[in-house]
Amino acid sequence: MVEEQIERRGVRDPGVLRAMRAVPRERFVPEAERQRAYDDGPIAIGSGQTISQPYIVAFMTEAAGVGPGDRVLEIGTGSGYQAAVLAEVGAEVRSLEIIPELAERARRDLAAAGYERIRVRTGDGWAGWPEAAPYDAILVTAAPAEVPEALVQQLKVGGRMVLPLGTGTQTLVRITRTERGDERETLLVVRFVPMTGGATKPGH
């Protein structure tokens, strides 16, 4: 998986590649789908959600510049797989999941796989997790129509947020918070499930 799907497409960060080899992806997919765990694509995990394609998980982790000791917030725990990869890189991980059943399953699966230190909370990712801010990196795994400003404010100066944006065609964007303002870069065309909660309220 790592050599053919990830390295071949240009992911180079040694820590990310090592993490992708270390995390048992089959532990984070439904039992009926385990034979497809390492396929080059997303897999449905229930509640209308998916576990992202392995390449996208690796690409986002590298694009966010996550390294050992970083404090990282993930929006959209889903299966828990992306959180496990972040932890394997050496980050201190907090993750928010709006669907209670998925949050509970992710807690259980992460603990069973040895990732007990990841903190998973049920809540609306639009507002983030402000009491643990500021973050070195924020990864968003569901697409809002516009950038959640609360999340930008929870980044450290120099911190990076990687998120999909858009309601039709989506683009993966990296936002770097600087002392002069926010710098934005467009990285990839992607397809993620839409962000719910506060992201769907009028004016958002």
Image (tube, rainbow, N blue to C red):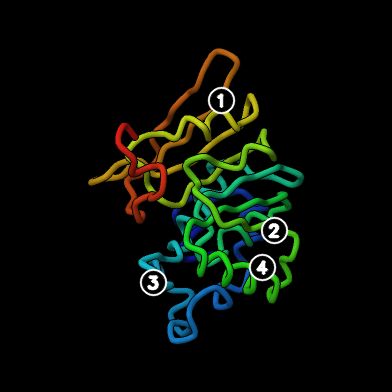
| SS at mark 3 in the image | strand
Q: Earlier in the sequence, mark 3 or mark 4?
A: 4
What residue did someone put label 4 on?
22
Number of other residues with Cα within 10 Å of mark 2, as a class: few under 14, some 14 to 19, many 20 or more = many
Residue density around tag 3, few if under 14, some if 14–19, many if 20 or more, within 10 Å: some
Identity of the residue drawn at 30% across and 36% down: 202
Count the marks: 4
Residue at the (48%, 56%) spot, across then down:
98
- Callouts 3 and 4 close, C-beta under 8 Å: no
Vertical relation: 84 (above or below) 186? below
Residues under numbered marks 3 and 1 in contact, where contact means CB atoms less than 8 Å apart: no
Q: 109 or 60: which is nearer to us?
A: 109
Distance CA(mark 3)–CA(mark 1): 33 Å
Q: Which residue is mark 1?
A: 177
First reached walking from the N terminus: tag 4 or tag 1: 4
Which of discs 3 and 4 lies nearer the camera? The answer is 3
**Quarter occupied by the C terminus:** top left
Q: Which residue is mark 3?
A: 44
For the view shown, which residue lies furthest in the front direction?
202
Question: How many neighbours does mark 1 have within 10 angstroms: few (below 14), some (14-19), or many (20 or more)?
Answer: many
Q: Nearer the viewer, mark 2 or mark 1?
A: 2
Q: How far apart in space, not on screen, are marks 2 and 3 (Cα)? A: 23 Å
Q: Earlier in the sequence, mark 2 or mark 1?
A: 2
Q: Amino acid at mark 1?
A: Arg
Which x, y percent locates residue 182? 50, 22
Point out which mark residue 118 bears: 2
* Mark 4: few/some/many CA within 10 Å (<14, 14-19, 20+): few
Q: Looking at the picture, does residue 73 appear above or below residue 159?
A: below
Front-lying residue, 155 or 40: 155
